[in-house]
Image (spheres, helix red, strand yellow):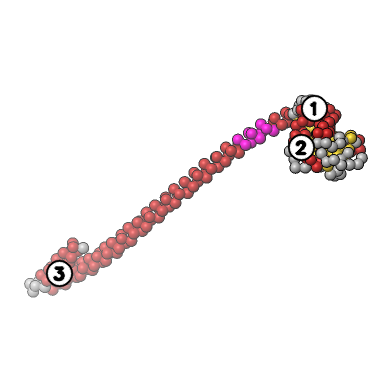
Amino acid sequence: MKKISLILALFVLLGVASCAPTVPQEDYDKVSGELSTAQSQLVSLQTKLTEAEKAGAQSKTQITDLNKQIEAGAAELKTIKTKLDALTAQKNSTDSELAALQTKYTDLDARYQALLKTPAPVAAGDLEQALFKQINDERTKSGVKALSWNASIYSDVLNNSKKMAANQRLEYPVQGTYQQVYRAAGYTDAQKMAESVLLVWKNTEYYKDRFLYSVLEYGSIAVYISEGVYNITYVADSYK
């Protein structure tokens, strides 16, 4: 800007000097025209310079804003990456736990399948008689009459034991209030197996009512073996 002002002053002085009477009019007019043109060009240049300075300031502001936007975007990207890393770590942990559970399940299932394929070492009839005797022993200890074996009841309970084997779950007979069921596997001795089954039944809420009730006179136990699993049904009643 200072250079432009000095040039303008120089042209003014030249203009004043050119006004001396010793200068021919033609030369004066020529120089005057050139001066006017130069002044116009300088004004135009000054205007352009001012506009360029303004544009430069705007560009600087835009650049500053863009830098701020870039920094904000980078911070947001960093936050998102942190969340993604956390989710990835959580997923990997869940996958590891799931794999461990799947391995455990596979091992238990293999052991269960192997157990099912093992031939039943205890005969169904032996377990029926051993368990029925132990129930009567408990009734005698409690001062009540021993149950009499009933073939009609046995037919019903055997059908129920077969139903449990087919459905692979505990099923209760439709008839008979005094009843109990169980499924067991892995025993090699009828006496010990009967003791274990009766122990489970003793720990139920209705043991005394279903096994030691004094009005009961008849009963039966049916065992049906399927794939190594003993499906056991007990029913007692006061009539045949």
Segment tinted magenta in the rendering: 100-109
* Mark 1 secondary-structure assignment: helix
The one nearer the camera, 159 or 33, is 159
* Horizontal and vertical percent position of residue 134: 81, 31
Mark 1 or 2, nearer chain start: 1
Amino acid type, callout 1: Ala
* Horizontal and vertical percent position of residue 216: 86, 40
Whether 107 is among the magenta residues is yes
Mark 3 or 1, nearer chain start: 3
Which numbered tag is attached to residue 215?
Answer: none
Q: Which residue is mark 2?
A: 201
- Residue visible at 49% across and 44% down? 85
Packing grade of label 1 (10 A; few <14, some 14-19, many >=20) is many
The one nearer the camera, 79 or 209, is 209
* Mark 3 secondary-structure assignment: helix
* Horizontal and vertical percent position of residue 82: 47, 46
Q: Quadrant of the N terminus?
A: bottom left
Q: Which residue is mark 1?
A: 190
* Mark 2 secondary-structure assignment: helix
Q: Which residue is mark 3?
A: 12
Compared with 78, 6 (above or below) is: below
Amino acid type, callout 3: Val
Q: Quadrant of the C terminus?
A: top right
